[in-house]
Amino acid sequence: MAGEKSGKPVKAAARGAGGAAGEGGAAKARRPRKPASAPPAAAGDGPVLLSGGNPQIAKGYGDAPVAAYIAAMPGWKQEVGRRIDALVTRAVPGVRKAVKWNSPFYGADDEGWFLSFHCFAKYVKVAFFRGAALDPLPPEGSRQKDVRYLHLHEGEPLDEERFTDWVKQASELPGERM
């Protein structure tokens, strides 16, 4: 038997109810797969939520794609998205907006992007692309030396004064070209 050669027991679930397939038992049932050419979701279905509840929104520039992303954010994260957008919009008049890689991006003039956010299962991650130059530093580090993060968890208040200060500082730095 296959399990005896390696010294590891064979899992019963792999053998089915009556032993291994071919020994009178049933083979392990498989879920039917969605055909590769499945039609896109119907208009009323709304955006697909990816891992961690992050909305899948088509790439686009301007307020509309960002508003669509925020509207599709699940549960408490939607209010966090609305608050971030409102604070950034108020702090940086004429801020540029876009959705890229299923995340809202914010930029000043044509100088690149200074901030983005993304939904994860337990928090919303705000990325300051030149965050290492902010004072004080946003709390979370990154593998990228210039990037710093702010994680916003359910039920935790956002220090709006500090956040707005970071946004103003970040918008005055050279942006990230993406």
Image (cartoon, helix red, strand yellow):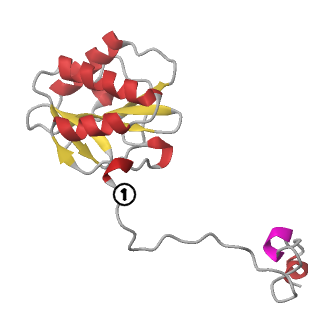
Residue 114 seen by the camera: yes
Whether the magenta-drawn stretch holds residue 17 is answered as no
x and y percentages locating residue 57 in the rendered image: 30, 48
61 sits to left or right of 136? left
Who's the residue at 66% across and 72% down the image?
30
**Front-lying residue, 41 or 133:** 41
Q: Quadrant of residue 88?
A: top left
x and y percentages locating residue 124 in the rendered image: 43, 32
x and y percentages locating residue 172 in the rendered image: 16, 25
Give the residue at mark 1. Answer: 41
> Which quadrant does the N terminus fall into?
bottom right
Task: Name the chief secondary structure element in magenta.
Answer: helix
Who's the residue at 83% across and 76% down the image?
15
x and y percentages locating residue 177 in the rendered image: 18, 45
Residue 97 seen by the camera: no
35 sits to left or right of 161? right
Read off the magenta span.
11-15
- The amino acid sitting under disc 1 is Ala
176 sits to left or right of 4? left
Q: Quadrant of residue 146?
A: top left
Who's the residue at 62% across and 69% down the image?
31
Who's the residue at 29% across and 35% down the image?
129
Q: Secondary structure at mark 1?
A: loop
**Front-lying residue, 143 or 62:** 62
